[in-house]
Image (cartoon, rainbow, N blue to C red):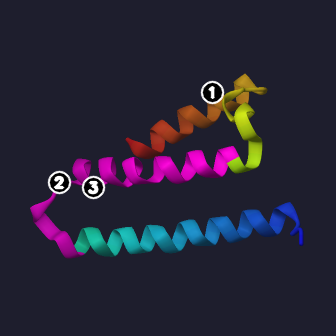
Amino acid sequence: MFFPRSFIGITLTMIAVVLGICTGMIVKKLGDDVSLITVLFYRFWFSVPLLIAFALIMQGRQFLWIKQRKTMMLRVFFGMCGIL
């Protein structure tokens, strides 16, 4: 059974929001014991295997090939701005 791409995108966005809220609640619970940099490091560290698994499922071995370099650079720029 196939779903439209827009439905998949909306679903994944909602999951990201819910998981972001959960992360925020965990950070609030930990309080001053853990620095923000440490929390961000582990959040990205544990998300990398999930991202790689999803990319392999969707694209196979070609998941590292970049077809639109300008778009990728723009996404990297905005991603870095969001992290900073």
Q: Distance between the residues labelled 3 and 2?
A: 7 Å
| Main SS, magenta residues | helix
The amino acid marked with disc number 3 is Val
**Pointers 3 and 1 in contact (C-beta within 8 Å):** no
Give the image location of residue 82, x and y in percent.
46, 45
Q: Which residue lies furthest to the left in this view?
A: 33
Mark 3 closeness class: few <14, some 14–19, many ≥20 residues within 10 Å: some
- Measuring from the top left, give residue 45's x and y in whole percent: 38, 47
Disc 1: which residue: 73
Q: Position of residue 41 (x, y in %)?
A: 31, 47
Q: In this view, does 42 lie to the left or right of 82?
A: left
As measured in the structure, the alpha-carbon distance from the residue carrying label 3 to the one carrying label 1 is 26 Å
The residue identified by callout 3 is 39
SS of the residue at dot 3?
helix
Among numbered discs 3 and 1, the one appearing first in the sequence: 3
Q: Is residue 77 above or below residue 27?
A: above
Q: What residue type is labelled 1?
A: Met
Q: In which quarter of the image is residue 43?
A: bottom left
The residue singled out by tag 2 in the image is 35
Farthest top residue?
A: 69
Question: What amino acid type should be assigned to the residue bearing mark 2?
Answer: Ser
